[in-house]
């Protein structure tokens, strides 16, 4: 039998991040058991702590959907905006206050579906916003409909015969549009998620971190992986790093930092050059 | 000092003189000169001009900048105004001050891209889904475009809500010799009178929501378009939802006396009362003036505040003046007429519309015909 005190002790957080950065009075959160968003959010706030940021120096912006609800739990200056529009809102904030750390956390539908055009243009402008794209490859909040990143052939409530369309590659989109920091990670390796998000938060320009995340409730259940562990296993088996052997890359998803350009000027700062002239 | 200025330029000048620091927009005729002028002026006033990817991005950037402490506005025309509707509701719900200038052209859809229309009146008042507060101002000439852009910015900040300026293509593109008045300046944000730990972003003071605090001063709060309590966090508690929506939906009425502005012209002994807004208000004034010279008993009201509507004031005027009929010229199929009929419910006075949407101003003869023989 487990000693109750031991069981409690095992849940004591390893750092002070949740105390400082979570609005604990609003917990428990609304996410399903086994969801990956909590794992990612924990890594985000661990990085806030590590960077020594102050709560009122961080503006944390989200749109609508499961990921959209993250802003309610973060103890910072938070905005839960309308569907797809977190990035233009964040752009307005950063342009007015370049001294603020502006972070946008988007879902795949929110970020590259309804908000796809804003995503492209935020990248093109190189506005100093960190965009964390939680890609669970489905519309979770509305009950499991197909999303822009649902793989071809995968099932959802609106692709009962399998998704006919090809899926979108968030990182390639970001690279093509001119984002100056682009990376992909997955929730099966939370420490690495934290490391990369930490780099993105410090990047002076538009930084995109796509985090492959599990939605066992919808994506997993419809696609033969109802247990979140199965989904995490799938991420491990179906992704590769640059250093992976060539024969293990075929048909898999690349993980890592694809671009880290520190030379392109950030927009809120370069615009202010006009003030001097 | 007098200057010859185009309406859209006067709008931009008014905004700058009021203290505008941020503009985001997307080019659209007939409003583009506002963007062009501000792209030149804003950097000289420590301000930001952004051309966004579309009108939705524009209004959201305006909301973001305003939240971050920069007085902000956007300008557009019909198609862009339609795209902005969802965000207008967000600004109303989240109580973030923004101003939208809509230089009306003829619709629906692309309509007549370069020609006048006045068909966005109902959309300006009711456009976004759900009941919501909004103030709508409408200038009828270049000088008024300067003034009402400033008043819209002022009231947006004061009441923490979206305000709309409804100009039209002729007001926007017309050039007039203008003697500009003293500017109306946007109020500055002050720190709440409670420390951060006691701060409730949607608590009220004398019935109104408290001012937005500047960022980075120790206050952390949550902004959402979902129904929320005083602390800003989402709620579905019926009593709290009711409290919020009751407060939002009485905001405009509580300040109606300060918001409502209109001009009366030659009302004394008027047997016919003309009520008209935007460019048609200016045209109607000419017609009324001319008919008076010929001895006809005709008067005019030009509302500058389209919402809240000057319902009580109009009904008082009609009670005192006793007109035999009311004529409402407007470049749409009767949107202002509907408001007038609503305001004068209970009076047995015919309200005659003069309606023509063909890309032009309604000719004075049509208004004259309605006044004399309608």
Image: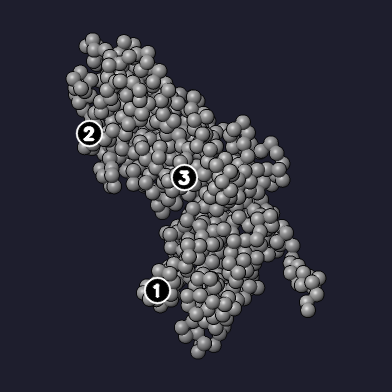
- Numbered circle sitting on residue B89: 3
Q: Are marks 3 and 2 in contact (CB under 8 Å)?
A: no
Query: Where does label 1 land, which residue?
Result: A160
Residue A98 visible in the shown view? no
Q: Do the numbered discs 3 and 1 sit on residues whose CB atoms are within 8 Å?
A: no
Asked if labels 3 and 1 share a chain, the reply is no
- Residues under labels 3 and 2: Cα distance? 31 Å
Q: Is residue B215 above or below residue A222?
A: above
Q: What residue is drawn where x is 46% and y is 37%?
A: B134
Query: Secondary structure under badge 2?
Result: loop
Q: Residues within 10 Å of mark 2 (few under 14, many from 20)?
A: some
Give left or right: position of A114 versus A92.
left
Q: Residue at x 69, y 57 (%)?
A: A24
What separation in Å lies between label 1 and label 2 (alpha carbons)?
A: 52 Å
**Residue A249 % position (x, y):** 50, 84
Chain ID of residue with mark 2: B
Label 3: chain letter: B
Which residue is tagged 2? Answer: B356
Left of A168 or right of it: where is B289? left
């Amino acid at each position: 039998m487990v000693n109750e005190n031991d069981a409690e002790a095992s849940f004591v957080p390893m750092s002070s991040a949740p105390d400082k950065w979570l609005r604990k009075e609003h917990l428990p959160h609304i996410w399903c058991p086994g969801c990956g968003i909590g794992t990612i959010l924990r890594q985000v706030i661990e990085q806030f702590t590590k960077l020594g940021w102050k709560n009122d120096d961080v503006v944390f912006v989200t749109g609508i959907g499961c990921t959209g609800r993250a802003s309610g739990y973060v103890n910072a200056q938070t905005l839960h905006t309308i569907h797809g529009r977190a990035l233009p809102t964040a752009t307005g904030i950063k342009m007015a206050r370049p001294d603020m750390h502006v972070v946008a956390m988007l879902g795949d539908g929110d970020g590259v579906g309804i908000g796809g055009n804003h995503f492209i243009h935020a990248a093109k402008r190189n506005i100093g916003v960190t965009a964390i794209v939680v890609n669970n490859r489905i519309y979770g909040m509305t009950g499991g409909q197909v999303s822009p990143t649902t793989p071809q052939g995968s099932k959802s409530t609106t692709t009962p015969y399998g998704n006919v369309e090809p899926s979108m590659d968030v990182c390639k989109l970001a690279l093509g549009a001119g984002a100056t920091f682009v990376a992909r990670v997955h929730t099966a390796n939370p420490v690495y998620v934290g490391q990369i998000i930490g780099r993105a938060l410090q990047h002076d320009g538009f930084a995109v971190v796509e985090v492959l995340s599990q939605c066992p409730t919808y994506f997993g259940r419809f696609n033969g992986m109802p247990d979140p562990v199965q989904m995490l296993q799938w991420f491990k088996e179906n992704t590769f790093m640059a250093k992976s052997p060539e024969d293990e890359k075929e048909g898999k998803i690349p993980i890592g930092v694809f671009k880290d350009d520190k030379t392109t000027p950030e927009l809120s700062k370069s615009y202010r050059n006009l003030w001097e002239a | 000092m007098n200057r010859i200025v185009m309406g859209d330029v006067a709008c931009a000048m008014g905004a700058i003189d009021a203290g505008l620091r941020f503009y985001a927009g997307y080019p659209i005729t007939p409003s583009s000169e506002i963007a062009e002028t501000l792209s030149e002026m804003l950097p000289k006033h420590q301000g930001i001009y952004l051309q966004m990817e579309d009108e939705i991005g524009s209004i959201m950037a305006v909301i973001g900048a305003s939240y971050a402490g920069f007085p902000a506005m956007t300008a557009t025309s019909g198609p862009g105004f339609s795209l902005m509707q969802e965000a207008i509701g967000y600004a109303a719900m989240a109580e973030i001050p923004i101003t939208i200038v809509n230089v009306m052209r003829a619709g629906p859809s692309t309509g007549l891209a370069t020609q006048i229309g006045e068909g966005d009146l109902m959309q300006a008042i009711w456009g976004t889904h759900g009941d919501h507060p909004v103030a709508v101002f409408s200038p009828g000439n270049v000088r008024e475009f300067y003034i009402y852009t400033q008043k819209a910015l002022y009231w947006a900040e004061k009441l923490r809500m979206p305000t709309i300026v409804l100009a039209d293509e002729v007001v926007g593109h017309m050039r007039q010799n203008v003697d500009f008045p003293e500017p109306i300046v946007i109020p500055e944000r002050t720190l709440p009178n409670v420390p951060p730990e006691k701060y409730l972003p949607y608590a009220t003071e004398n019935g109104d929501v408290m001012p937005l605090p500047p960022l980075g001063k120790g206050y952390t709060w949550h902004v959402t378009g979902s129904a929320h309590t005083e602390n800003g966090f989402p709620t579905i508690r019926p009593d709290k939802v009711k409290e919020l929506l009751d407060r939002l939906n009485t905001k405009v009425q509580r300040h109606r006396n300060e918001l409502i502005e209109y001009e009366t012209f030659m009302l004394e002994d008027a047997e016919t009362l003309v009520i008209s807004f935007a460019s048609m208000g200016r045209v109607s004034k000419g017609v009324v003036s001319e008919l008076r010279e010929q001895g006809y008993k005709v008067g005019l009201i030009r509302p500058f505040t389209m919402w809240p509507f000057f319902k009580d004031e109009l009904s008082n005027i009609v009670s005192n003046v006793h007109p035999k009929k009311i004529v409402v010229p407007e470049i749409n199929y009767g949107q202002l007429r509907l408001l007038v009929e609503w305001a004068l419910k209970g009076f047995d006075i015919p309200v005659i519309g003069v309606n023509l949407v063909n890309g032009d101003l309604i000719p004075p003869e049509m208004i004259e015909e309605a006044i004399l023989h309608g």
